[in-house]
Amino acid sequence: MCLAIPARVVEITDSEQAIVDLGGVRKEVSLALVEGIEVGDYVIIHVGYALTRLDPQEAEKTLALMADAELTPTEAAS
Amino acid sequence: MKYVDEFRDGQVAQGLARAIAAEVVPERRYNFMEFCGGHTHAISRYGVPDLLPPNVRMIHGPGCPVCVLPIGRIDLAIMLALEKGVILCTYADTLRVPASGRLSLMRAKARGGDIRMVYSVTDALKIARENPNKEVVFFAIGFETTAPPTAEAIRQAAKEGMKNFSVLCCHVLTPSAIINILESPEVRVLGTVPLDGFVGPAHVSTVIGSRPYEFFAEEYRKPVVIAGFEPLDVMQAILMLIRQVNEGRAEVENEFTRAVTPEGNLKAQKLVSEVFELRRTFEWRGLGEVPYSALKIRKHYADLDAERRFNLEYKPVPDNKSCECGAILRGLKKPTDCKIFGNVCTPENPMGSCMVSSEGACAAHYSYGRYKDAEVSA
Ligand code: SF4
């Protein structure tokens, strides 16, 4: 039940409600726990609430780090 | 799905596996606990152990809210439904958790209890608005991720002056459970649970931030790497833990920077502290009584507290004798160490709580690792 999924905000219906796109399915979620969310943002959804905004730049950085993991061993290992 | 599929890429996983293999010191053993059930699930589902060298071992932790819910708490919920005639609303996962007298919420429902599965606490509020003549109780379970939605619902109910809604609050806290494990004799004295570091919670950390873990790193000299719930996140976190161990560091590192900041979600934290306060102690399945490890509803919202409203008194109930959930939740045993794993106890007919939710160690092993484990032990 802790599983929570990233979804894209497609519409903000009022200040505390939004419609998100969850892999093609539209779902209503509450924005009561987050601030400053805009249409197009990705948020992590858990039990009907957005818990946090997902930072696309940080996601890119992490993916780059993973892709390069093999090429950048630390000194301790070499 | 974006931000999901990229973090499940098989080729990148192989690359991470090679990086891990290259960096482990062969004569050393690495024992890491993944605290969260979400990680347990990902590790089993994607076969992460197959990608790790034999000297890197993952230990399942107690971070599955369904698994740690003690029988006595479910008994209270069942009693409300069967004896007090309330409409009891609950998340799906709690329905099949075994309770006293061979009951579960599901079986209580078959006996006529009005028990309704909800996806969100907002659904419970809706049910209360639609049934003004009935008492509606929301059975609130979960860690720091589900507590803020419950807090928000309580505030909303107070604002609307709802008279027929209340919450049976069983929210528990991650840091206290980690301390309990670190302080356990198995870890401190006996060494039966060797622990070299933690994979820190994903979504819990989006709320509480990475800062609360600094204490463990400093005080107990254990590295913590907060990780997302996708398989690559877990692999990357394991690599980061191995590097910390190799370099003799014990720090809090964050792999899940796309969602977790040092301070966490301040708005959610503020809401939680406005509505809840700490319980002096709370019983966990497996860990027993853990001081200051759970939340209760503040006096200001007493009308919305089902425990006060129905004068509920908690009574501890011992677990099924053959069930090893307790030892599994403490990292002491593996699901396959339980004699009734997979034969008497299955997800269709769970005997213990770890077999109920897909994040429970036993259910995850049963669903994804059963055949492999059988081969190994044969
Ligand atoms: S297999 Fe079932 S009875 Fe055994 S420890 Fe797991 S949940 Fe408990």
Image: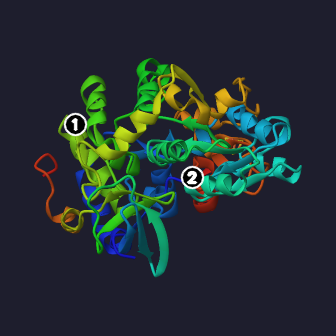
Q: What SS does tag 1 mark?
A: loop
> Does the beta carbon at disc 1 come under 8 Å from ligand 1?
no
Rendered-image quarter of ligand 1 = top right
- Residue B257, percent from left and from top: 24, 55
Residue located beneath label 1 in the image: B251
Three-letter amino acid code at the position of disc 2: Val
- Residue B118, percent from left and from top: 64, 57
Q: Nearer the viewer, residue B253 or B27?
A: B253
Is tag 1's residue or tag 2's residue first in the polypeptide sequence?
2
* Residue B110, disc: none
> Is A2 left, or right, of B96 in this rendering?
left
- Residue B59, percent from left and from top: 47, 42
Chain to which mark 2 belongs: B
Q: Residues within 10 Å of mark 1 (few under 14, many from 20)?
A: many
Residue located beneath label 2 in the image: B121
In the figure, residue B321 lies in which quadrant?
Answer: top right
Q: Is residue B105 above or below residue A62?
A: above
